[in-house]
Structure formats: C-alpha cells, structure tokens
Image: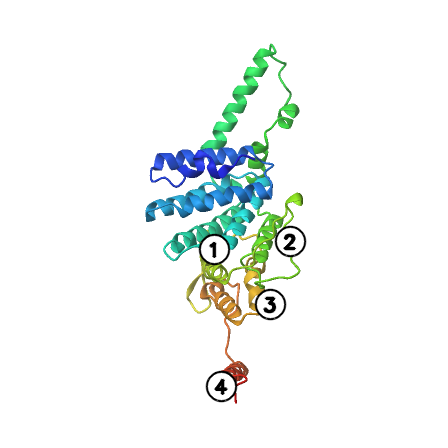
C-alpha cells in the first residue's frame, strides 16, 4: 500500500481552506470505496495519518468541520467490507495515542470521539441508506464506470441487448448495497460486531488482559488497547446523548396525565445497546469505573424511555454504603508498616 501519511489528501484535510478540505474528503472517499480489500494494518496506517492530520488542524471551526467530515460525511459512504475495519482502526488508534494528546488539543479529540460514537449509531441503527445520496464520490465512480462500459462496447462493435435477468446480474456492488439498505432494517449482527469492538477496546472492563494475544502482522491481527480510563469515562458520559440523537420518539400520556417520550420503531433490544455499560458496572475491578457506569445507566432519560426502572433506595443499600465507608475509613487510618 502507498504511504498514505504522505499523500496530498491527508495533508489537505487539515487545511483552513474549505475548498481544499472538500477536495481532500472527495479523494479520501474515492480511495476507500475503490480499495475494498484493505487490511487492518493498511487502515491502521491510514488512521495514523488522519490522527496527525487532525492533530495539526488549527482554529475551532476548522477542527469541528474536519471532525464532522471524517465522521458524518465519510463513514456512511464506506462499503460494507470496509466499515467495521475502519471503525476498529479508529478506536485502536485513539486508544493507543490518547495518552499523547496534550491538554490544549484534548477538547477537539473529545469532539471527534463524540462524532464517531454518534455516526456509528446512525449508520448501524438506521442503515447505510439513510442518506438520500451516498456521496458525490459514489456518483462520480458510477459515471466513470458507465462511460468505460460504453466505450468498451463501442470498441467491440456493440452487443445484443441483455435480458432483465442478465441486467440484474451485472449490477455493481454499490447498487446491490443500496438495494439491501433501502428497507432500513437494522443488521443486528453488524451492530453486535461493532459493540464487541468497543467492549474489546475503550469499554473493556479490564485495563490489562494478560491473556490477550500479541500482534501478528502476518495474520493481519493488531490487538485493541483496553482503555485508557479517560477515554472510557468520556464514551460512557456521551453514550446516552448520542443514542438520543439517533432515536425517533413519540409523545405518550401516562395514567397520571404527564407526557413522556417513548422511542418508536426501534428494532434493537435496549439490553443490547446498554450491554457495554452493564458489563463495566458488573465486571470492572476498578470502583470509579463501576460508579461512573452505574451513573450512566441511572440516566433519567432511560427511565422515561422505559429502558430502566427508577432505583429505589432501601435501608439495606444505606447499610451497604455505610459499611463501604467504614472500610475506606479503616484503610485510611491504617498507615501500613511503620519504622517503630
């Protein structure tokens, strides 16, 4: 593969000139749609270039525009063979390089992460066919393909008109993909596969897994970094926010006369969408992570949507909290082995 970190469109994505950014996005989209056989290592190299392209982008408006370009403009146009590998390469790059982001650049990366959490929900819960047109890049690619086919047929003196069955067999992968996603049905297997990527990466209960296999470039395997905690906290904090943006709601009047919002037309079990947070709450060995996950799951919106029941504090819960406080006090009073 070409060293994409040195290609013009990578550098132009960070430009303050909108025309150059649009041109670079167009080139990047064409590249990704043309290379449907990219390996995990290839996409990791690509994201290394994109990471530093974003690192060097200046000015808040340029940063926000670039974040949306790399997420909401690019991800919905990706072909199916590339989508999950591209998202995995993003989370692998962010997890690996998150610690190297200085405080002055942290906010723009947190916004990029928010965009990727949101666009993944949009694509996987609404389907790739949610947008009226995939992209100018797709249209241009089809146009060129038709021109090439017409040129080839004219050179050969023309062929007999194909039957309806033969025309269907000659459809391009892009056309087949659009037909598959027109119905708007959610691909549960694709959603579960993406959630598994997050549960193996930023939302993994463990910070370090000694049983995780090492990298093996020969087999195109690069292990996901677990965490770090700063990334884990941020994804938990924005999880329900980004879900709310994608879901469609209807107003329902309760028996008490109050009006609440309920998700409508959702084809995905709520338990599946909340599974990564539930795993962190139950399986994380680190108490602050468990507490933060529990707080995210106690969001009032989840109660309003009927996904969770409002927690009722009981006397036993108060006693458990008192015991935990007493244990922490005892640990604080005991100073360990002294010199005396």
Earlier sequence position, callout 2 versus callout 4: 2
Residue 283 numbered mark, or none: 3
Circle on res. 57? none
Circle 4 sits on which residue?
333
* 4 or 3: tag closer to the N-terminus: 3
> CB atoms at circles 2 and 3 under 8 Å apart?
no
* Disc with the residue nearer the chain's start (1 vs 2): 1
- Of circles 4 and 3, the one toward us is 4
Say if mark 1 contacts mark 4, CB within 8 Å.
no
**Which disc, if any, is residue 214?**
2
Q: Seen from this angle, which residue lies furthest top? A: 157
Report, in whole angstroms, how far the alpha carbon at label 2 lies from the one at label 3.
23 Å
Q: Is 75 situated left or right of 272 in this image? A: left
Decide: marks 1, 3 in contact (CB < 8 A)? Answer: no
Farthest residue in the bottom direction?
A: 340
Residue 333 vertical placement versus 105 (above, below): below
């Amino acid at each position: 593969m070409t060293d994409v970190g040195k290609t013009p469109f990578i550098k132009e994505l960070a430009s303050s000139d909108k025309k150059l950014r649009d041109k670079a996005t167009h080139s990047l989209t064409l590249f990704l749609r043309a290379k449907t056989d990219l390996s995990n290592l290839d996409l990791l190299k690509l994201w290394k270039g994109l990471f530093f392209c974003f690192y060097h982008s200046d000015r808040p408006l340029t940063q926000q525009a670039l974040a949306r370009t790399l997420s909401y403009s690019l991800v919905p146009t990706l072909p199916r063979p590339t989508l999950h590998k591209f998202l995995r390469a993003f989370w692998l790059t962010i997890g690996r390089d998150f610690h190297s982001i200085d405080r002055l650049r942290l906010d723009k990366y947190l916004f990029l992460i928010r965009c990727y959490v949101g666009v993944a929900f949009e694509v996987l819960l609404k389907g790739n066919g949610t947008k009226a047109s995939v992209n100018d890049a797709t249209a241009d690619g089809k146009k060129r393909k038709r021109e090439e086919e017409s040129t080839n047929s004219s050179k050969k003196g023309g062929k007999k008109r194909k039957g309806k069955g033969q025309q269907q067999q000659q459809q391009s992968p892009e056309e087949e993909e659009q037909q598959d996603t027109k119905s708007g049905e959610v691909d549960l297997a694709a959603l579960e596969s993406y959630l598994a990527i997050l549960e193996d990466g930023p939302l993994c209960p463990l910070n370090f897994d000694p049983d995780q296999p090492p990298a093996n470039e020969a087999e195109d395997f690069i292990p996901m970094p677990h965490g770090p905690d700063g990334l884990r906290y941020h994804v938990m904090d924005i999880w329900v926010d980004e879900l709310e943006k994608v879901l469609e709601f209807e107003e329902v009047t309760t028996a008490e006369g109050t009006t609440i919002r309920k998700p409508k037309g959702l084809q995905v079990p709520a338990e599946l969408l909340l599974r990564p947070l539930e795993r962190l709450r139950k399986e994380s060995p680190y108490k602050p992570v468990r507490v933060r996950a529990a707080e995210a799951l106690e969001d009032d919106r989840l109660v309003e949507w009927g996904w969770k029941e409002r927690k009722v504090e009981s006397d036993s819960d108060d006693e458990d909290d008192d015991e935990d406080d007493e244990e922490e006090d005892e640990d604080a009073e005991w100073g360990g082995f002294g010199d005396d």
